[in-house]
Image (spheres, helix red, strand yellow):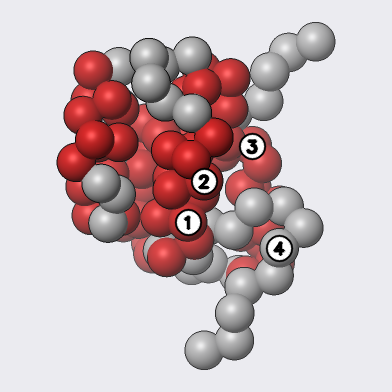
């Protein structure tokens, strides 16, 4: 079985939100540090050369969890950070603005 990246999980949701192409491009180039992640989580990501939202979304859940000391709590923190910029997990609806 081929592991899906976080990005592939978000693709269908982005279509539902009708995120504009330019806006999505801008968000993909944001630094992970702009997501409000803790220094600890950022340090773990940077050790794996994950610096941008695009880098992050191209990782699989398993790849992230394989990072030393990166557990379910860190993964949840990443998911919450992505939600702050409009990337919602499948099955979750965005909050009305």
How far across and how far down the image is residue 44, in percent?
Answer: 28, 25
CB atoms at circles 3 and 1 under 8 Å apart? no
- Label 3 residue SS: helix
**Residue 51: where, in percent of width, then height?**
24, 33
Front label number (3 vs 1): 1
Q: Name the residue under label 1.
A: 80
The residue that disc 2 covers is 76
Compared with residue 61, is residue 21 higher up or lower down, i.e. above or below? below
Dot 3 surroundings within 10 Å: few (below 14), some, or many (20 or more)?
some
* Of pointers 3 and 4, the one earlier in the residue sequence: 3
- Who is closer to the viewer here, 78 or 86? 78
Give the mark nearer the N terminus: 3 vs 1: 3
Name the N-terminal-most of marks 2 and 3: 3
Q: Mark 3 points at which residue?
A: 8
Give the spatial CA distance, label 1 vs label 4.
12 Å
> What is the number of the mark on residue 92?
4
Instruction: Report whether 5 appears left or right of 45.
Output: right
Q: Is mark 1 on a helix, strand or loop?
A: helix
Residue 34's place in the image compared with 49, above or below, is: below
Across and down, in percent, residue 92 comes to 71, 63
Dividing the picture into quarters, in which one does residue 74 lie? top left
Residue at 41% in and 16% down: 67
Q: Is 84 drawn above or below residue 49 in the view shown?
A: below
- Disc 3 from disc 1: Cα separation: 17 Å
Quadrant in which the N terminus appears = top right
Secondary structure under the numbered disc 4 in the rendered image: loop
Query: From the viewer's perspective, is the residue at label 2 or at label 3 nearer?
Result: 2
What crowding class fits label 4: few (fewer than 14 Cα within 10 Å), some (14-19), or many (20 or more)?
few
Depth check, mark 3 against mark 4: the one in front is 4
Q: Nearer the viewer, mark 1 or mark 4?
A: 1
């Amino acid at each position: 079985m081929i592991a899906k990246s976080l990005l592939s999980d978000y693709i269908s949701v982005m279509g539902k939100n009708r995120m504009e192409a330019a806006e999505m491009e801008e968000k993909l180039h944001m630094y992970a540090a702009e997501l409000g992640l803790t220094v600890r989580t950022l340090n773990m990501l940077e050790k794996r050369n994950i610096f941008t939202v695009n880098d992050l979304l191209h990782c699989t859940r398993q790849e992230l969890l394989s990072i030393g000391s990166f557990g379910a709590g860190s993964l949840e923190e990443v998911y919450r950070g992505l939600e702050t910029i409009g990337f919602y997990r499948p099955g979750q609806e965005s909050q009305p603005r």
